[in-house]
Amino acid sequence: MPQAQKRIPRELLFAAAATCGLLMALAVHIITSRLGLGLASAWREEGVSSLDPLRSALAWWLIAAAGGFGGFASAVLMVDPPRRGRARALVEWVAALAFLILLAGAEHYGTGEVGIGAKASLNAGFAALSLGALTACIGTACALRTPPR
């Protein structure tokens, strides 16, 4: 008689997947702000360029995509008890490695964009947190809409 596999409760699964998506969105925010594509690019105090609104919009889309994709991918990988196949194990390891590299890259770059005031930087951080949380929850909810097999 095969042993029944226990499933993760959906509330815990949702919280874990949304947290992974949020962390990915915040890591992308940190990296993009350090590369000059931050949310606060449009609020630069000196050296204003005509491309600053475009950079800010690109940062919004990158953060939203990272949060949504991170929540969706995490939920999909956690929804089923892992079937120990080589393909499934490879996907899990690649996803975990990509997640760790992204977080390590965010730690390496640090925060802060040149020419951005403290208030604008703080507001951009809160906006990134809110946007990342929203899109991570939406991505997770989309992944969990299909009933488990």
Image: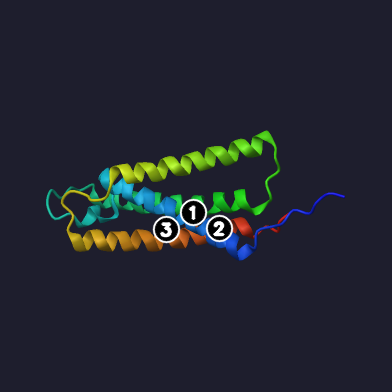
What is the C-alpha distance between the residues marked 2 and 1?
10 Å
Kindly check if marks 2 and 3 are in contact, taking CB atoms under 8 A apart as contact: no
Q: Residue furthest bottom?
A: 11
Q: Nearer the viewer, mark 2 or mark 1?
A: 1
Which residue does the numbered mark 1 point to in the structure image?
20
**SS at mark 3 in the image:** helix
Tell me if mark 2 has few (under 14), some (14-19) or many (20+) residues whose alpha carbon lies within 10 angstroms of its own: many
Q: Amino acid at mark 2?
A: Thr
Which residue does the numbered mark 2 point to in the structure image?
140
Residue at 58 percent across and 41 percent down: it is: 92
> Is 72 on the left-hand or right-hand side of 108?
right
* Sequence-wise first label, 2 or 3: 3
Q: What percent of the width, then of the height, locates residue 47?
A: 13, 48
* Sequence-wise first label, 3 or 1: 1
Q: Amino acid at mark 3?
A: Gly
> Is 81 on the left-hand or right-hand side of 108?
right
Which residue does the numbered mark 3 point to in the structure image?
132
Q: Nearer the viewer, mark 3 or mark 1?
A: 1
Q: What percent of the width, then of the height, locates residue 1?
A: 87, 50
What is the C-alpha distance between the residues marked 3 and 1?
10 Å
**SS at mark 2 in the image:** helix
Residue at 25 percent across and 56 percent down: it is: 40
> Is 94 on the left-hand or right-hand side of 3?
left
